[in-house]
Amino acid sequence: MINKETIIQSYELAKKQYAEIGIDTDKAMTDMKKFQISLHCWQADDIGGFERPDSELSGGGIQVTGNYPGKARNINEVKQDLEKAMSLLPGKQRVNLHAIYGDFDGIFIDRDKIEPKHFQSWIDWAKQHKIGLDFNATCFSHPKAESGFTLSSKDENVRQFWVEHVKRCRNIAAEMGKQLGTASVHNIWIPDGSKDIPVDRFGHRKLLKKSLDEIFAVEYPTEYLKDAVESKLFGIGAESMTVGSHDFYLSYAAKNNKLICIDNGHFHPTEQAGDKISSVLQFVPEILLHVTRPVRWDSDHVVNLNDEIQLIAHEIIRSDAINRVNIGLDFFDASINRIGAYVTGTRAMQQALMIALLEPLDQLKEYEAKGQNFERMALLEILKAKPFGAVWDYYCLNEDVAVSQDYITEVQQYETNELSKR
């Protein structure tokens, strides 16, 4: 058990050190409350969903590895796991749902027939916990996605099926936003692509644009719904061409005033997703971030406090974009305790944001503007040795959540009391 007095004493010392370089640590902790990270429901059950009694992930270039005990088996267990994860996180979070997580009461409802009523229990649950909900169309793990094409399919029946599905998803998301009083971000990602080198790239992209135009023909109030589109470099079975490339969706978002979703696992390993933030914010109203940890490819490992995540956080703060960036998590690891994955990954993103808030930005910009690049470099290096951890622990203490390694014990107890019985 962490000693509270030690935390307080360490914080007071850290506060003085940061003050020496012009940083108000109390303000940084206040600014942390502006961030609400959307927890992805699919980490709890390995993207199975509850569309069918035997639902399991298939297709779309998505792969979950591992079989750690305690996987959520129904909606109530997903909610229970999310509640536990949120109880170990400072601040207020959101929850991100895929369309296959509806409350279908054991009855198969195909995706072109889903309605807000199938998600009312989620809305009621979110009201109870005073959180917002985000939403995603599910354009994979379905017979009509087996060809590898959905919204860009040349089979008109297939294409119209998916257009109708996404239309209904937007309606559901708007209803969530309306009832909860906070806009729901609805994100469109499709697995469409080609395993080998295609000839008619143009034709498929023309169809995708047509589908999006049809989907967005109905407008919803922005206080209820924010629309995002998400690109990908490649997927398993779609290595040679992805219809919804970054170029395609960025162009569409900029032209149609939509959010662009930047998933940091969806680019070439040599690209920096964080570097894209300041660029795309010049042309779109807001962005959606899907934060993950790719290892050599889009493998969606649990987020940790690495350089990439810190760059993403720094660019949000340096771009003065706290109110223009929506942050969601998108990793799935079935090889470790799933609640531990939630908490570790979310805390890593939160820690990155706090580190960014503890940066003397005005001083650094002044050095840069004057060409004092040595001074800029030196100050950035000095920051690395500052006692960020003391500020973070104090923040968790003030938020009345487990501090430091205490959260490990809490997760272990939950595994013993709940997960081991599943």
Image (tube, rainbow, N blue to C red):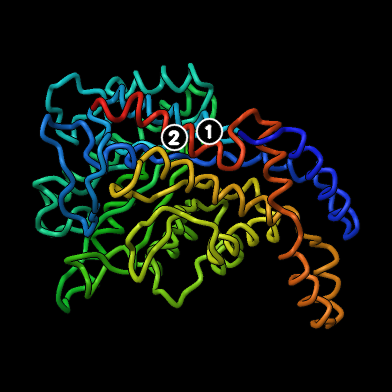
Dot 2: element: helix
- Pinpoint residue 293: horizontal percent, then vertical percent: 42, 60
Q: Is residue 376 above or below residue 61?
A: below
Position of residue 140 in the picture relative to residue 329 (left or right): left
Position of residue 380 in the picture relative to residue 151 (left or right): right
CB under 8 Å between callouts 2 and 1?
yes
Q: Quick one: label 1, few (<14), some, or many (20+) residues within 10 Å?
A: many
At x 86% / y 71%, what residue is drawn?
366
Examine the image and state in which quarter residue 381 appears.
bottom right
Q: Which one is in front, 222 or 128?
A: 128
- Numbered badge on residue 88: 1
- Residue bearing mark 2: 411
- Numbered badge on residue 315: none
Position of residue 308 in the picture relative to residue 198 (left or right): right
Specify the quadrant that holds the N terminus: top right
Position of residue 299 in the picture relative to residue 378 (left or right): left
Q: Which one is in front, 251 or 414?
A: 414
Specify the quadrant that holds the C terminus: top left
Q: Which one is in front, 219 or 50?
A: 50
